[in-house]
Image (tube, rainbow, N blue to C red):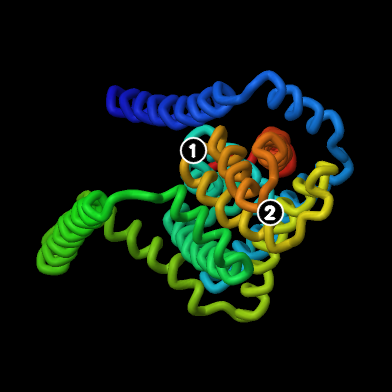
Amino acid sequence: MKSSLSKNLRQVLKFILFFGLGVFIIWLFQRGLTMDEKAEIGNAFRGADWVLVAMVAVFGLLSNVFRTLRWNMLLAPMGYRPRFHNTFLSVLVAYFANLAIPRLGEVMRCTFLYRYERIPVEKSLGTVVSERVIDMFCFLLVFVLSFCVEHEALHRYVERLFNRSVGSRLGLLFWVFAAAVALSLIVAGSILYYRRHKEFLPEDSWLKRIAKVFRGFGEGFLSLRRLRHPWLFVLWSLGIWFCYWFMSYFAFHSLEALSDTGLGIALIALAMGTIGVMLTPGGIGVYPVIISETLGIFGIAKTIGYTAGWISWGAQTLIIIIGGIVALCLLPLINGRRKA
């Protein structure tokens, strides 16, 4: 009971830390605005085309449909055929939970899938890791493509955003390398010990329990190699990121000042905005600032860029909150009284 309480306390403190960071960044940016600039942001909000803002939400939901189809494909090689509505609603719950605590949603969606489809959590969690690997590859692809489209502009932005001394970079790399080596030694030692003593270990030993979890995790992760229709998996993956791309595009075009913004600028905004989402829960505070600075490279006023960032972030976050609440209500209703 005590350990569970301390774990919950750590999660709450982590949420407060990241949420506080986002609020601090909002305050810091607003503090540097003049009264005229604040009035300009208000006027831009009032003049936004809310039909196009709604399209941001529509493409956000469509991206989750593609994500659901892709996840079901990863589960299929292990012999699981979850119902689409359960997988889809679990994905919505995951994004909702991630707003509070980063990566909590990944565990929650696997837990809900176990509750309503009886798919072991360790196996579905392995497929989620596969998804993350693919998404990281797609993100790098987006970054490279945006670099090719606007090489000079993006180079200036990266220099300004990540301008650190060589010494600090080397120091960071050293500690990352040291942590990776230490973790590798611990894992390798545990595996070696388990292999030599597994015959003498009782069935309920913690090492055998961990080994069972890792076997299921590995099976889920390696399901990527046994896909029946790899081209369809690629199509769903590209569909997710095309939706993200058009979400940025429609958010920009909802403002009259950005009505002539091309797809190239939206692609760069997607690449940089994704970094913001990684830094704080849902990108709160960071995302609008990054979008403002990105558009500033192309001579767009920071107030307009900041407004565009808030519209894009607000539409996405609103659909996540509404979708998450609706999913939490629908899952038990659709599945009756079935319990884990």
Give the amino acid type for the residue marked by disc 2 in the picture: Asn
Drawn side of residue 330 relative to residue 26, left or right: right
At label 2, counting other C-alpha atoms closer than 10 Å, the crowd grade (few under 14, some 14-19, many 20 or more) is some
Say whether marks 2 and 1 touch (CB < 8 Å).
Answer: no
Q: Which residue does the numbered mark 1 point to in the structure image?
A: 280
Residue drawn at the location 24% of the way across and 49% of the way down: 168
Residue drawn at the location 68% of the way across and 19% of the way down: 35
Give the amino acid type for the residue marked by disc 1 in the picture: Thr
Drawn side of residue 336 relative to residue 180, left or right: right
Label located before the other in sequence (2 or 1):
2
Q: Which residue does the numbered mark 2 point to in the structure image?
A: 64
Q: Which residue occupies the extreme top position in the image?
A: 35
Drawn side of residue 21 relative to residue 51, left or right: left
Residue drawn at the location 41% of the way across and 50% of the way down: 162
Can residue 147 be seen here? The reply is yes
Q: Is residue 238 above or below residue 171?
A: below
* Closer-to-camera residue (154/121): 154
Quarter of the view holding residue 330: top right
Q: Where is residue 181 in the image (x, y as percent from the top left)?
A: 17, 60
Position of the N terminus, as image quadrant, is top left
